[in-house]
Image: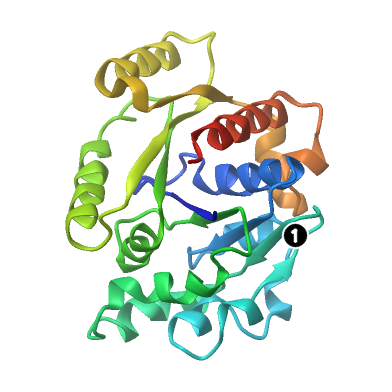
Amino acid sequence: MTQIICIANQKGGVGKTTTAINLAAALALSAKTTLLVDCDPQANATTGIGLDKSGLKKTLYHGLIGEAEAVDLIATCDIEGLHILPSRVELIGFEVEMMGAADREKLLRRLLEPLRGRYDYILLDCPPSLSLLTLNAFTAADTVLIPLQSEFYALEGLGQLLQTVKRVKKSLNTELRIAGILLTMFDGRTNLSTQVAEDAEQYFRDLIFKTRIPRNVRLGEAPSFGQSIFTYAPASKGAQSYMELAEEMMGLSP
């Protein structure tokens, strides 16, 4: 059964796209067919996985406005079993063009529905905002994974995100649940990272993933080469951590 996982946090720079790319790669390397859907107009997941945006004829935007079927938008990646539904800057227009459309929050769900059963996992990389695109991702998803940066102010705004998830669950997607909160950019040598981890575990208890993603230079470098951490630096701590996260996610699957 396909699991659709939305990776979201309205704060920027918390490791959303890094997590989307590398969790998708780790799942594929674990023999799980995986689709990464780039829901962000910045399209960092598209370039970070190695796709040339300039060569794309149609993207997620064309699927959302009804000009293409999802299956016709999918591109392959350099890891077997990993595919991507790419994005580009024109996705910005979706917010404006669909503002008055009926059921505008359900367009991504409808687009992805024919893909249920084709993949073990579909990962949705969201923009850093609680926008119409993010609401579409929440409405399409089974679970939400929230990356949380291990730095000052990390917990600020998290309550707003959880309230949004609760509202979507009530009105648009009754099956939606939180898969967990992932501590990213974690440095166990600093008091700040340790304090954020302790605060998060105190407030959210069982929602915190056991895996913590370390502050790792290789994780930051990999996207500029259009690679996941597993092809760029497979022996790094970053690669090890994302494989551990994939194992945790597979353990959560029904």
Task: Determine whether, in the image, residue 105 is placed left or right of residue 31.
Answer: left
Q: Nearer the viewer, residue 9 or 26?
A: 26
Residue located at (25% from left, 55% from top): 174
Where residue 74 sits: x, y (%)? Answer: 66, 72
- Vertical arrangement, residue 38 with respect to residue 214, above or below: below
Residue at screen point 70% across, 23% down: 237
Report the colour scheme.
rainbow
Query: Residue at coordinates 25% horizontally, 42% vertically from top-left?
Result: 162
Tell me where residue 96 appears, x and y as whole percent: 31, 81
Q: Position of residue 214 (x, y in %)?
A: 59, 24
Left or right of 153 in this view: 39: right
Q: Is residue 114 above or below residue 84?
A: below
* Residue ID at (61%, 69%): 86
Q: At label 1, which amino acid type do we have?
A: Gly
Question: In the rendered image of this protein, does residue 11 appear above or below residue 194?
Answer: below
Q: Position of residue 20 (x, y in %)?
A: 57, 48
Q: Quadrant of the N terminus?
A: bottom right
Outermost residue toward the bottom?
67
Could you tell me how many numbered marks the image carries? 1
Q: Is 98 placed above or below 76 here?
A: below
Label 1 crowd (10 A; few <14 / some 14-19 / many >=20):
some
Report the residue marked by disc 1.
Answer: 50
- SS at mark 1 in the image: loop
Say which quarter of the image contains residue 179.
top left
